Amino acid sequence: MSETVASLVQMAEPYGRRVPYGSAYWLILPATLFLAACYYYPLIRVVWISFSEPTIGIQNYEQLITSASIHRVVTTTLRICVLCTSACVVLGYIVSYVLLRAGPTKRRVMLLCVLLPLWISGLVRAFAWVTLLRNEGFINSTLMWVGLISRPLDLVWNEVGVVIGMTHYMLPFAILPLYASMLEIDQRILMAAQSLGASKSQVFLRIFFPLSVPGVAAAGVLVFVYSIGFFITPAILGGGKTLMIAEYVRLQIVELLRWGIGTMLSVTVGVSVLIIWGIAVKLIGTQRMFGRASL
C-alpha cells in the first residue's frame, strides 16, 4: 500500500511544480514587444510631433488658449457629449430597471436586443439615421401624415441629428454597467423596507437609487469619454455643419497638413480622458462602478 502511494505521489509531483517566478516574464514578452511596436511607439511619435512641428516648443499647445476656432470645436464637442451622456444615462437607467424586474425569458430577449446594435457597423447605423431623420424620411413623413407638424423638422445635418445618432450608438454602453450595478443591490434590503411600511416610491428614492449611483457614475463616465472621440456619426449626421474634435483633427492633418495642431489635440484628448477616468476610479472605485455581477 505504501509503495502504491509513493508511486502516485512521484507521478503527480511534476504536475504540482510551480513555474519559476522569473520565467513568467518570458511568457508575456511577445505580447509586450507587439504592443511596444504597434501601440506605444506610435503614441510616443504623436506626442513628439505635437511638440516638434513646425518647430520644437509648446506653440501648438498655446493654441488651446489663443485659437477661437479650437474654442468653438471644444465647446461644441463638450456640449454634444454632455447631451449624449445625459440622454444615455436616463434612458439606460429606465431600460436597466425594467431588465432587473423582467422574468428570465424576457430578460434574455431584452439583453439580446441591447447587444444586437453592437454587431452592426457604426457607418451603417449613421446612414440608417439619415434615412429616418431627413425631410422626406420616415419620422417627418409620419408626423406630417398624423397632422402633428405642417412642415418637416430639422432633425439631421445639425447637432440634433448628431446627438440622436450618438445616443443610439452609446446606449448599450450605459445599460450594461447600470444593469450590472443594479444586480449587486441586495433585494432583501428593499423587501425589509417594504415590510416596515415604506411605499414603492420611498423604497426607490431612498434606498434603490442611492445604491445604484455608482452604476450611474460608471455609465456617465464611460459614455462621456467614449463620445469625445466620435468621428463617423458626427461627420455623417452633422453634414459638415457640426464639427467635433475628431473631425477637426482629421481636417488639420489630412487637408491642411498641420500635423502639430492635429497631434496636439489628439494628445490633449487622450490625457483628458485618462484624467477623467482616473478621478472617477479614485472617487468611486472600479469595484463599485461595475460590480461583480456577470450578465
Image (cartoon, grey):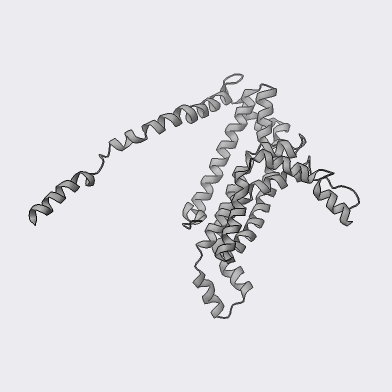
Q: Nearer the viewer, residue 173 or 8?
A: 8
Residue 116 screen position, x and y as percent: 61, 49
Residue 42 screen position, x and y as percent: 52, 27
Q: Nearer the viewer, residue 167 or 251?
A: 167
- Quadrant where the N terminus is found in the figure: bottom left
Q: Is 175 left or right of 281, judged from the image as shown? A: right
Q: Is 181 left or right of 136, judged from the image as shown? A: left
Question: Is residue 257 something one can see in this rendering?
Answer: yes
Q: Residue at x 57, y 57 (%)?
A: 178
Q: From the viewer's perspective, is residue 100 above or below residue 251?
A: below
Q: Is 11 left or right of 136, judged from the image as shown? A: left
Q: Residue at x 70, y 23 (%)?
A: 255
Q: Residue at x 53, y 59 (%)?
A: 181
Residue 59 screen position, x and y as percent: 62, 25
Q: Is 163 left or right of 278, judged from the image as shown? A: right
Q: Nearer the viewer, residue 130 or 176?
A: 130
Residue 228 screen position, x and y as percent: 63, 41
Which residue is the extreme one toward the right?
Answer: 150
Q: How many callouts does the rendering have?
A: 0
Which quarter of the picture shows residue 28?
A: top left
Which residue is the extreme one toward the left?
Answer: 2
Q: Nearer the viewer, residue 145 or 67?
A: 145
Question: Is residue 220 something one can see in this rendering?
Answer: no
